[in-house]
């Protein structure tokens, strides 16, 4: 009998936030660093989700494993990094919206679940913002320093699930 090769899980690594609002750009900046530094297997997608809201539902539905970087108001000391997994994630995202028309990512996850396709594994790596009202400013230094540890958390999580990236060579 012929053995079938297991299909690798589809992985979406998603950075959320608005780079024009200070620390809210944390997720997008983390994705930019990952894209510059690593090559991933073909079943892995890296995406700058920005503030796209419900436009992200199809990508979320297609993922078996979802890793999200975002600035999240956990009520922790500014610049703190925290990771949460699976069922705990929807309870915390979307805690702070910058405008009334903005969709919280928790609503995107809820819609994906209602439509019947929800990632089997979910990791949120969030940083407690220092400054969100800094329009046009970059990340606060305390938040910027958390990009490397956040990437390390994501790579460890993915490694445990059989997903290993390769560091890009300087010539790439």
Image (cartoon, rainbow, N blue to C red):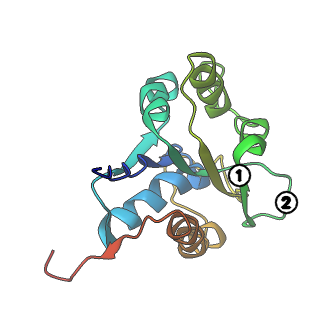
**Residue 71, how many percent across, how many down?**
64, 51
Q: Residue furthest bottom?
A: 170
Q: Quadrant of residue 42?
A: bottom left
Residue projecting furthest to the left: 171
Give the structural element (helix, strand or loop) at label 2. loop
Q: Residue at x 43, y 49 (%)?
A: 9
Horizontal and vertical percent position of residue 36: 30, 68
Q: Marks 1 and 2: in contact by CB < 8 Å?
A: no
Q: Is residue 95 visible?
A: yes
Q: Is residue 56 above or below residue 24?
A: above
Vertical comparison of 151 with 170: above or below: above
Q: Which residue is mark 1?
A: 85
Q: Which residue is mark 2?
A: 76
Secondary structure beneath disc 1? strand
Q: Is residue 63 left or right of residue 111?
A: left
In the displayed image of the protein, which residue is found farthest to the front? Answer: 1
Q: Nearer the viewer, residue 133 or 17?
A: 17
Question: What residue appears at the point 57 percent right and 20 percent down from the top-left corner?
Answer: 116
Question: Tag on residue 99?
Answer: none
How far across and how far down the image is residue 172, in percent?
A: 15, 74
From the image, state whether disc 2 or disc 1 is nearer to you. 1
Q: Which residue is at the front of the view, 105 or 113?
A: 113
Q: Is residue 19 visible?
A: no
- Given residues 12 and 15, the one toward you in this image is 12
């Amino acid at each position: 009998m012929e053995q079938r090769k297991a299909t690798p899980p589809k992985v979406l690594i998603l950075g959320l936030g608005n780079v024009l609002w200070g620390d809210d750009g944390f997720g997008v900046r983390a994705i930019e660093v990952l894209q510059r530094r690593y090559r991933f297997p073909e079943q892995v997608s890296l995406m700058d989700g920005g503030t796209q809201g419900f436009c992200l539902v199809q990508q979320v539905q297609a993922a078996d494993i979802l890793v999200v970087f975002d600035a999240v108001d956990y009520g922790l000391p500014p610049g703190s990094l925290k990771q949460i997994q699976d069922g705990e994630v929807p309870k915390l995202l979307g805690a702070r919206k910058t405008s009334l028309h903005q969709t919280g990512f928790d609503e995107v996850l809820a819609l994906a679940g209602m439509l019947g396709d929800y990632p089997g594994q979910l990791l949120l790596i969030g940083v407690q913002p220092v400054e969100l009202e800094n329009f046009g400013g970059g990340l606060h230094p305390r938040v910027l320093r958390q990009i490397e540890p956040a990437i390390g958390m994501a790579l460890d999580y993915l490694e445990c699930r059989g997903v290993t990236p390769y560091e890009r060579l300087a010539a790439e």
